[in-house]
């Protein structure tokens, strides 16, 4: 939960997890600094230098002010496993309330290592090859800031998660993208070969993918490893949705031959255990890479989330049935919302994983999804986010009518949203 001060009148209010940058809080372009690079990179620099809220904050605020169902920002509306929640309460009672070690409590690092062994047959050394971070977000930021020198290139897929673009720009790197196109959102291999060069320092991948719900095929992963070797690039892989897959098993790129030595794998407990506000993430990889990243990470947050760390360790050790159950329930929710969107007249891409499904509003007569999303609350009482928010300006036209809907919500909420969305059909 985040508390936000509103300038007029001055009071503190809870927005239940949604940050808001008030329109009154205008930063002037005269205020120089690195913030401008981060904001511009994430396409959040408005006219006259105003810092715009992220698409998630903007749409959550819209849901709050209109009372619409929030299928925008990806956070669950139900609690995760009781054992995990109870372990956090217990840890607070037991006095686990001071700084953990800089790389995280041993109990969590051991649990992360054991989880990698159990699911992927990887065996990172818990003392040298695992670092706990303040969510995947900090791991991504520290990795990019630590490994980039000005002018280096970072290759990502596009659409991309917003923090990548912000951190790439902040670091002074050049952001190169490879398109993922509807309906399957798989990259063209020639595009990928073309994007990676000797200037590439990092190939940053995200499978399962936000916002499209796509999972990258094995041949693509193999090509990424091959290109990373050829051009001496580092692979950074964001796998926060690793357990939320619908039928296919997630393959970490670090398991491919030749990948481990040049790969930083990033994940988080937020999605798997429905604890997005706890911000317990981690990275695994060869110790020389992690050491370099730690040099930056230790001055970002230093450490975080002491009592939540042993709780996430409990979660990572839950039986297989838990992990299957989470994916199974989410798959039913995907099916429910996807059917609702189809009935409403959208063309729906099949989501293979994650919290999200992409729907094309063109068949309903809406060519501009950003415009549609601004009006969706009054039209249907539902909030969603336009895919164009995850795409650089010069490429937005290829994604103009696509909308991302989150289905990590209670069944009755998804049923209500589907019924309301049906009102869009002409
Ligand atoms: N990467 C992706 C692809 C995400 O979707 C998210 C959060 N939704 C994050 C990173 C950030 O994860 P965390 O909350 O653990 O920082
Ligand atoms: N990752 C969440 C999403 O994609 C948003 C997190 C945030 O608001 N930064 O919806």
Image (cartoon, grey):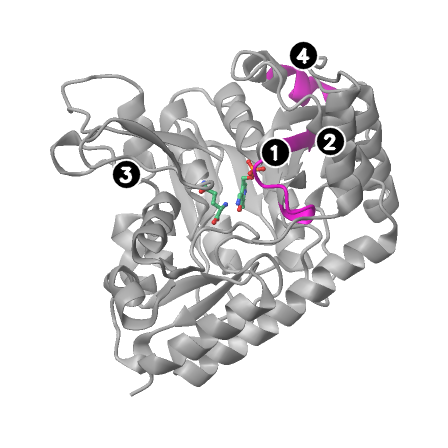
Is 289 left or right of 382, judged from the image as shown? right
Q: Position of residue 206 (x, y in %)?
A: 57, 47
Q: For the residues marked 1 and 2, what is the alpha-carbon distance in whole angstroms?
A: 10 Å
Label 4 vs label 2, nearer the camera: 2
On whether residue 272 falls in the magenta region, the answer is yes
Label 3 vs label 2, nearer the camera: 2
Q: Which residue is mark 4?
A: 99
Alpha-carbon neighbours of circle 1 within 10 Å: few (<14), some, or many (≥20)?
some
Question: Which mark is first along the chain, 2 or 3?
Answer: 3
Is 410 left or right of 112, judged from the image as shown? left
On whether residue 291 falls in the magenta region, the answer is yes
Alpha-carbon neighbours of circle 2 within 10 Å: few (<14), some, or many (≥20)?
many
State whether label 2 is within 8 Å of ligand 1: no
Q: For the residues marked 3 and 1, what is the alpha-carbon distance in whole angstroms?
A: 25 Å
Q: For the residues marked 1 and 4, what is the alpha-carbon distance in whole angstroms?
A: 15 Å
Q: Which residue is mark 1?
A: 278
Closer to us: 163 or 262 = 163
Q: Residue at x 25, y 71 (%)?
A: 367
Q: Are marks 4 and 3 in contact (CB under 8 Å)?
A: no
Alpha-carbon neighbours of circle 4 within 10 Å: few (<14), some, or many (≥20)?
some
Total marks shown come to 4
Question: Which mark is first along the chain, 4 or 1?
Answer: 4
Question: Which mark is first along the chain, 1 or 3?
Answer: 3
Q: Which residues are magenta?
A: 271-292
Viewport quadrant of the C terminus = bottom left
Q: Which residue is mark 3?
A: 44
State whether label 1 is within 8 Å of ligand 1: no
Looking at the image, the residue that sits furthest to the bottom is 426
Per the image, label 4 sits on a secondary structure element best described as loop
Q: Are marks 1 and 4 in contact (CB under 8 Å)?
A: no
Q: For the residues marked 4 and 3, what is the alpha-carbon distance in whole angstroms?
A: 34 Å
């Amino acid at each position: 939960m985040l508390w936000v001060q509103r300038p007029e009148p001055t009071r503190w209010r809870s927005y239940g997890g949604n940050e808001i940058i008030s329109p009154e809080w205008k930063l002037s372009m005269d205020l120089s600094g690195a913030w401008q690079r981060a904001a511009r990179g994430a396409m959040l620099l408005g006219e006259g230098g105003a810092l715009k809220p992220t698409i998630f904050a903007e749409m959550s605020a819209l849901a709050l002010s209109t009372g619409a169902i929030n299928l925008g920002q990806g956070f669950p509306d139900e609690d995760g496993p009781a054992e995990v929640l109870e372990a956090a309460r217990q840890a607070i009672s037991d006095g686990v309330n001071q700084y953990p070690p800089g790389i995280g409590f041993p109990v969590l690092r051991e649990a992360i290592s054991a989880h990698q062994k159990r699911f992927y047959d990887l065996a990172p050394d818990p003392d040298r090859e695992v670092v706990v971070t303040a969510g995947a977000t900090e791991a991504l930021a520290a990795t990019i800031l630590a490994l980039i020198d000005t002018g280096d290139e970072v290759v990502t897929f596009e659409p991309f998660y917003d923090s990548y673009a912000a951190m790439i720009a902040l670091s002074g790197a050049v952001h190169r993208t490879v398109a993922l196109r509807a309906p399957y959102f798989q990259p063209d291999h020639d595009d990928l070969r073309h994007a990676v060069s000797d200037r590439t320092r990092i190939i940053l991948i995200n499978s399962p993918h936000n916002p499209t719900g796509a999972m990258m095929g094995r041949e693509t992963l193999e090509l990424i490893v091959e290109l990373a070797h050829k051009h001496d690039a580092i692979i950074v892989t964001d796998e926060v949705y690793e357990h939320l897959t619908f039928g296919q098993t997630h393959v970490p790129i670090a398991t491919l031959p030749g990948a481990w030595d040049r790969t930083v794998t990033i994940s988080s407990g937020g999605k798997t255990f429905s604890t997005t506000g706890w911000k317990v993430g981690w990275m695994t990889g060869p110790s020389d890479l992690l050491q370099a990243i730690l040099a930056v990470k230790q001055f970002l947050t230093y450490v975080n989330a002491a009592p939540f760390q042993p709780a996430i360790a409990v979660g990572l050790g839950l039986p297989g049935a838990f992990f299957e159950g989470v994916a199974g329930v989410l798959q039913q929710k995907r099916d429910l919302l996807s059917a609702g969107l189809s009935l409403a007249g959208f063309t729906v891409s099949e989501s293979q994983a994650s919290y999200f499904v992409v729907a094309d509003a063109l068949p309903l007569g809406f060519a501009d999804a950003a415009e549609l999303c601004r009006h969706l609350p009054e039209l249907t009482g539902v909030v969603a986010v336009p895919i164009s928010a995850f795409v650089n300006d010069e490429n937005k036209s290829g994604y103009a009518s696509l909308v991302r809907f989150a289905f990590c919500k209670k069944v009755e909420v998804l049923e209500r949203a589907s019924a309301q969305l049906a009102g869009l059909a002409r």
